[in-house]
Amino acid sequence: MDLYPALLQLVRILLSEDDDARTPELLLGLVIEATGAERGFIVVREGESYEQKFAVRFDRATISDEQRRFSRGLVRQAIEARQIVCLSREADAPRFALSESLEASGASTVLVVPLAHGDEVYGTVYVEYGTRGAGDEARRFVAELADLAGLFLRRAIERDALRRRTQSLERDLFARHDFQGIVAQDPKMIALLKTVAQVADTDATVLLRGETGTGKELVARALHVNSPRREKPCVTLHTSALPGTILESELFGHVKGAFTGADRDRVGRVASARGGTLFLDEVAEIAPDVQAKLLRFLQFGEIQRVGSDRTERVDVRVIAATHQDLPALVEAGKFRRDLYFRLKVIELEIPPLRERAGDIPLLVEHFLRACWKRPGERPRWTARAERALREHAYPGNVRELAHAVERACVLATGPVLDADLLPPDLTASAAAGPAAGATGAAEPRLRFSKLSADELEVAREAGAAQAERAFLAALMDRHGGNVSQAARASGLNRTYLQKLLARHRADGDG
């Protein structure tokens, strides 16, 4: 066995890979291939127990529960002694026979190598061999792996634990709060929803800022239904395109005879929301004279109906929203500065869809379930349609995506949804494709608004996810959705491929 090429490949993997799920599997796959082992995994110490992680060649379809067992005694010995433990069925027959897990595994040789960094031993590489057994070179190679990969694998396991805790917290967030209609897994949206959950219990005025179609009204609803006011009304007023007199009447109400056509007293939206929440959408459109009266209400909690000289107190929480740049309007003298600061006690920015591209597959699936009306048929997108949905810039944000999916469902004549069912601007974006440079290499269509390090990191993650989705779509299309065939043909480990498919909600099961 020539260890040098395999060790060189191991170092390259450690230097180039940053996927905490993929890298340990690649390393273990390299160990198994180089040493002729049957299968392997990493055993991690968690408190007083030992848990398998990153198993390679442990296909649940072909490996029994008995064969998946491992000797915790050997793991404990390797950790406590900080030495390689190698046990052979032939050379150590009595000890082999005494261990039910070893006897049931079917292995002829078991090699357990401690994973250490500094003075800490946190787990082992556990490798099983068939009839071939494990020679001295195999032991040396696995020992080199443990030495080189110890720190990386330790950090990978820590990040995996952190990721699982984060996912658990996210599930708990959605379990404890009502975010009906909001579909998200992107870190920006999760952070926003955590803030929503945090401020919902207060009476603080909230200003929602975001482009048209980002879901400001859904966030406003979440603020209301997760607050103590949830049993009271949540009243919405879209202020755009309403002249000042009508808007004032809509907000504060009027008395009979206040103006032509006022043939009876009317309770305004503020009084209708008494004890609850008033949502003012497109607040930047409010006329200047009404802005002053809205400011007075926010300051003193009092309203005066149009045509009346009497004031009344109303307890209402106000949530306002706009897609416009309010600070710029303030500087231009088009919006009252004092009202702006009164509205932005809590200011929440809702990211556009292009900045949370990882949510697109989830949203597509959500809207597809909502819009598909043919029982007994399971709709699925073609690779062309998926590409069009994935690559479009969505200037209309989530609302535009929802309408695109609805259109496809309405026009479909069968369960296969191709790109021709999507709006022309989506298919035009996909047909044009990324702009090609002088070398012919495709450049991704990226848009940056803040030009910050965080935005660059988000773009990198989104680009990697986009490449994975495109690869999976083409791979599964080629192999008719058969995971086993796709894994063999692509050279990917079947378990890893299944993880990728689950991550991206790709069609087709093995």
Image (cartoon, helix red, strand yellow):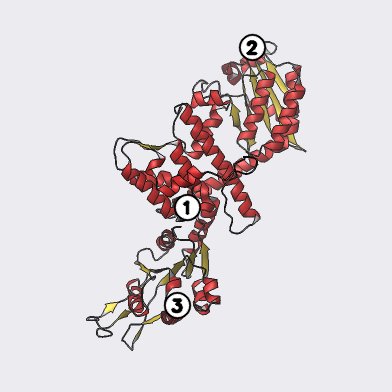
At numbered mark 2, what does the secondary structure look like: helix, strand or loop? loop
Choose the circle earlier in sequence order: 1 or 2.
2
Classify residue 310 by image quadrant: bottom left
Name the residue tied to disc 3. Answer: 298
How far apart, in angstroms, are the residues tagged by discs 1 and 2?
58 Å
Classify residue 454 by image quadrant: bottom right
How far apart, in angstroms, are the residues tagged by discs 3 and 2?
80 Å
Q: Is residue 161 above or below residue 311?
A: above
Q: Are marks 3 and 2 in contact (CB under 8 Å)?
A: no
Classify residue 213 by image quadrant: bottom left
Name the residue tied to disc 1. Answer: 394
What x and y, as percent, mark residue 271? 34, 75
What x and y, as percent, mark residue 459? 59, 49
Few, some or many C-alpha atoms within 10 Å of disc 1 (few <14, some 14-19, many ≥20)? some
Name the residue tied to disc 2. Answer: 131
Choose the circle earlier in sequence order: 3 or 1.
3
